[in-house]
Amino acid sequence: MTAALMTTKAMATTTILWMALPLFLGFSGYLVPKLGRLFALAVSIISLGYGLGRMLEPSSVLNWQFLDSFGVTLRVDSLSGYFIVTNAVVTAAVVLYCWRQGKNAFFYAQTTLLHGSVNAVFICADFISLYVALEVIGIAAFLLIAYPRTDRSIWVGLRYLFVSNTALLFYLIGAVLVYQANHSFAFMGLQDAPTEAMALIFLGLLTKGGLFVSGLWLPLTHGESETPVSALLSGVVVKAGVFPLVRCGLMMESVATVLSMFAVGATLLGVTYAILERDTKRMLAASTLSQMGFVLVTPAAAGLYALTHGLAKAALFLSVGNLPSRKFQVLRQGKLPLAMWVALAIPSLSMAGLPLLAGFGAKAQTLSYLSGWQQVVMSGAAVGTAIAFSKLLFLPTKLGWPKLKAPGLWWALLPLLSGLLLANSLYGDAYTTKNLLKALATIGGGWLIYGLMSWCIAQNFTKQLQLANVRLPATFERLENLIGMMSLILSLLLGMTLA
């Protein structure tokens, strides 16, 4: 008993030091500007070690209450480990990508602070600590989005900050209602709180996580940010909104039922936008909206899916940032060097669920928990994912190496692509004949549909079918309409929680 207590205290002390390190080194980067990028890389490597320790030891769980009377709680387990490892690898890749780009100390300091605050979300088990961490994330992300200091980047950053703060205002009201009902901010208090509390909290987290129509801020924000910032936003920042929902879904079955409906809706909406999108970065952003639905629909499988998505999406954003154009139409008229095509193909195939890559196991595990109509719909969405990423896979190629805008691209891709290969071993049970045939049929079906669509366009059948002109309206992405979407989601949540 004494040994167990000492082990718990040691874990708690290690965790506190690990949490404090990004804050210390982030601000130290201002004092020693030349070491800013080293500090950012060191923090991510330390987080990788810490996350792997938690991920590979499912029985090692830390529950620690700081303020018993308020329910301020820390929880670290294998689920936390998966998300922490994702944050670590993506952050390290972004730092390596920017290593020789002349980013100043401010950029690396904000990257380090963002990394630390995202990690804090992954170990929070109460609503008030989570609120503080999400607010810090919002500010750090805004400063990184606005880093170029152009009128466009500042507007996109302010738009993101306004949407984020509005969502968190709803969230905070819900958190207060939870405390009023339980005299505790702990996640478990949600089941005894008024239905309004659940609706308000979930609205804030669904918006932060980029889920369903309240997540339509993603395409513009991720599409217009600098390449490394887009990788951070899509690879880890949106998961800060999804993780608490996953945690609540694992704790309370009734909550999981409500969340699964929004997860399915987000998946279908996002994959539809991704298929119809003509801009590479906006397509990847729309895909993130869809993939967050996959993460949320099965909380028990969320860790592995979040890891594989984060690695693949960060690799894709960094690679797409080095293409000669963002427009698919322009890219089809030229030829990509083979090395660049490989950099795009590996994460794209992982996203589609190809065997031998981590995305295959993640999709198989997620679908194995579903049944009935949910499994059918999510399998259809997987076909849609294969269609969307066919736009990158079937670009014309040529032998050779590309002229890179960022010399650090290959160093950044090394941990990301290696992770997609190594993480393939985390769910060996996926390799059954049934799962292999299903994955190949899904990918093959997606490629076939994409080929038919391309053939119709090439044969000029678009006059009858209008395939080339189909686009979803951008009206819903306007700032005022994003706030309106929050009201709609709040009404839906209230109806579902009351039911």
Image: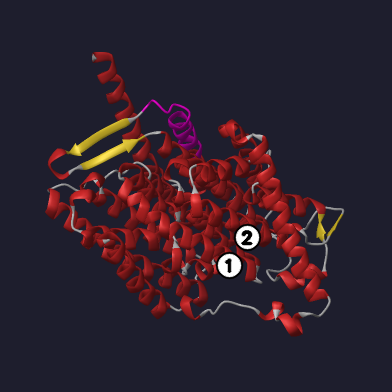
Viewer-side residue, 404 vs 313? 313
- The rendered magenta stretch, by its main secondary structure, is classed as helix
Q: Which residues fall within the magenta stretch?
A: 44-60
C-alpha distance separating marks 1 and 2: 7 Å
Which kind of residue does numbered mark 2 sit on?
A: Gly
Q: Is residue 264 magenta?
A: no
Q: Is residue 48 magenta?
A: yes
As drawn, is 63 to the left or to the right of 421? left
Residue lying at 61% horizontally and 49% vertically, measured from the top left: 312
Which kind of residue does numbered mark 1 sit on?
A: Thr
Instruction: Using a 10 Å C-alpha cutoff, classify the residue at mark 1 as few (fewer than 14 neighbours), some (14 to 19) or many (20 or more).
Output: many
Residue lying at 70% horizontally and 49% vertically, measured from the top left: 441
Residue bearing the label numbered 1: 272
Say if 54 sits above or below 245 in the image.
above
Residue bearing the label numbered 2: 384
Residue lying at 33% horizontally and 63% vertically, measured from the top left: 203
The outermost residue toward the front is: 372
